[in-house]
Amino acid sequence: MGIAERREREREQRRQEILDAAEQVFFSQGLHSATMDQVAECAELSKGTLYLYFRNKEDLLSGVCLRGLTRLKELFEKAVSGTQSGLDQVKAIGQTYFRFAADYPDYFSLMIYTVTLLDQVEELPHLEQCREMGTTLHGITASAIDTGKADGSFSTRHSSREIAVLLWGMTTGVIQIAHQGREKNRKRFDVDPDTLTETYFDLIVAVLS
C-alpha cells in the first residue's frame, strides 16, 4: 500500500469517526441545540481539525443524513429484489419506508430536516450527496412503477418519476401522522394510526391500478 493510499484510508477512517460522534451528539442533544464544539469534544478532536473534514454544522448534519439515506437505499433495493410485479414492488417500498421510520426515527427526523436545508443554504459537499441519493431513491420507486406499467399491474399514464416524488411526499406525511405523536394524533383526528396506514396503501393501489 502506497503512502497516498494509506493517508486516504486514514482520512476516511477519521471522517467516519467524526460522523459517529456527530450522530451521538445530534441524536442526544437535538439537531438545533447540538454544536460543533460538542461534536469535536465527543470525537476528541480540536475544532480546527473538525473543520478540515466538514465546512460547518449543516455540512456535518448532511453527512449524518447521508448515512440514513444510504441505509434506506439498501432496504429499498432489498425490498424490490424479492418481489415480481410492479405493484408488489411499490407496496414493498412503501412498507419498507414505514418500517425505516419506526426503526430509525432519528435518521428519519434528520432526513426531514435536511430537506429544508436544500433550498436554504449554500452548496455543501455532503448536502449535494444527499440530494443525489434522494434522486436515486426516487429512481428506485420510479423503476418499480415502470415495471408495473409493463406488467399491467398499473394502468396510470402519468410520469413514473412524478408519481415517485408524489408518493414520497405523501408517505412522509402519513408517517408523521401515524408514527410521530401517535397517541396525540389519535385523539386529534379520531382515527386509529394502524388503520390509517392500511387505508393509505389501499388508496394508493386503487389510484395506480
Image (spheres, grey):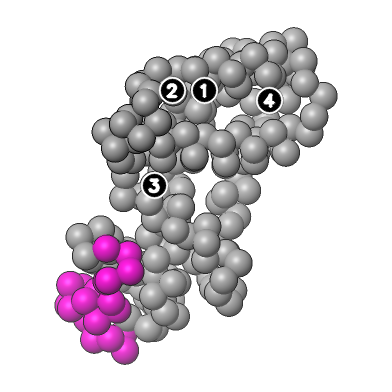
Q: Which of marks 2 and 3 is nearer the N terminus?
A: 3
Distance from Cα at disc 1 to Cα at disc 4: 17 Å
Residue for point 52% across, 34% down: 171
Q: Is residue 72 visible?
A: yes
Q: Does the magenta stretch include residue 40?
A: yes
Distance from Cα at disc 4 to Cα at disc 3: 24 Å
Stretch in magenta: 30-49
* Tag 4: amino acid: Ile
Residue located farthest toward the right when viewing the structure as drawn: 157
Which of the two discs, 4 and 2, sits closer to the camera?
2
* Tag 1: amino acid: Tyr
Q: Which of marks 4 and 3 is nearer the N terminus?
A: 3
Q: Earlier in the sequence, mark 4 or mark 2?
A: 4
Residue for point 45% across, 47% down: 70
Distance from Cα at disc 4 to Cα at disc 2: 23 Å
Which of the two discs, 4 and 3, sits closer to the camera?
3
Residue 180 at x, y percent in the picture = 33, 40
Local packing at callout 2 (Cα closer than 10 Å; few below 14, some 14-19, many 20+) is some
Residue 206 quadrant: top right
Where does the C terminus fall, quadrant-wise? top right
User: Disc 4 designates what residue?
Assistant: 145
- In the displayed structure image, the side of residue 174 where residue 186 appears, left or right: left
User: Disc 2 designates what residue?
Assistant: 196
Distance from Cα at disc 3 to Cα at disc 1: 19 Å
Q: Is residue 20 magenta?
A: no
On residue 108, the disc is: 3
Residue for point 49% across, 40% down: 172
Residue for point 45% across, 17% down: 198
* Tag 3: amino acid: Phe
Which of the two discs, 3 and 1, sits closer to the camera?
1
